[in-house]
Image (cartoon, helix red, strand yellow):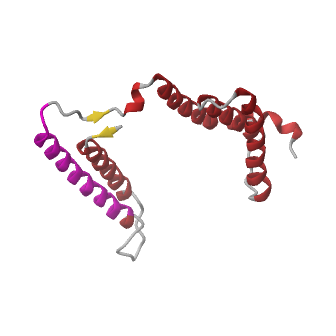
Amino acid sequence: MKFNDALWGALLTVFGAALLLHARGFPTIPGQRVGPGLFPSVIAVGLAVCGVILVVRGLRQRASASAGTAWFDLPEWARSPRHVIAFAVLVAVNLLYLLAVDRLGFVVTGFVYLAALMWVLRVPVARIVPIALVLTLAIHFCFYKLLRVPLPWGVLQSVAW
């Protein structure tokens, strides 16, 4: 999706202003002229300046372009129902992971995640289950055993290694 630079610039300017307001509330260090809010404030001002430049550039491009120039253009894939469904499944499995991984556990959530993505990518159904299972267990082993990242067990708590 192609957005006009003016839209991105406005968003960047608002983000920079919000960051600057937040950084101004950082506590000062007694006896120091420079506090913890200096660096975030400099970044915020830089973001806001870049945002204003993008707004000006986007408005100039829109004014110089032919009449009827859109603020944003949909890409070709957005007109394909199959691709829109694939995008929706991608968003849905990420939300599922965020909301359910603690209750269901990494193994169950990871398996559903990978299986749904492979289904939407039209992997043959006979391959989805074994591939998703092996990949989920391999990822779990790498993170849990090798990297010592405490992944949630969820419903499989009673069979935890």
Q: Among all residues in the image, which is located at the extreme bottom?
A: 31
Q: Quadrant of residue 119?
A: top right
Dominant SS of magenta comes to: helix
Image quadrant where one finds the N terminus: top left
Closest to the observer, 43 or 131: 131
Q: Is residue 141 left or right of residue 159?
A: left
Vertical position of residue 106 compared to residue 115: above or below: below
At 36% from the left and 66% from the top, the residue drawn is 38
* Vertical side of 67 occupied by 57: above or below: below
Q: Position of residue 110 (x, y in %)?
A: 70, 38
- Magenta stretch containing residue 43, yes or no? yes
Q: On the rendered structure, is 118 left or right of 19?
A: right
Would you identify the image quadrant in which residue 153 lies? top right
Question: The magenta stretch spans which residues?
Answer: 40-67
Q: Position of residue 61 (x, y in %)?
A: 16, 45
Residue 127 percent coordinates (x, y): 74, 33
Which of these two is toward me, 69 or 95? 69
The residue under the point 73% across, 48% down is 139
**Residue at 53 percent of width and 29 percent of height:** 86
**x, y percentage for residue 80?**
44, 25
The residue under the point 37% across, 73% down is 34
**Per the image, is 57 magenta?**
yes
158 relative to 155 in the view: left or right: right
Q: How many marks?
A: 0
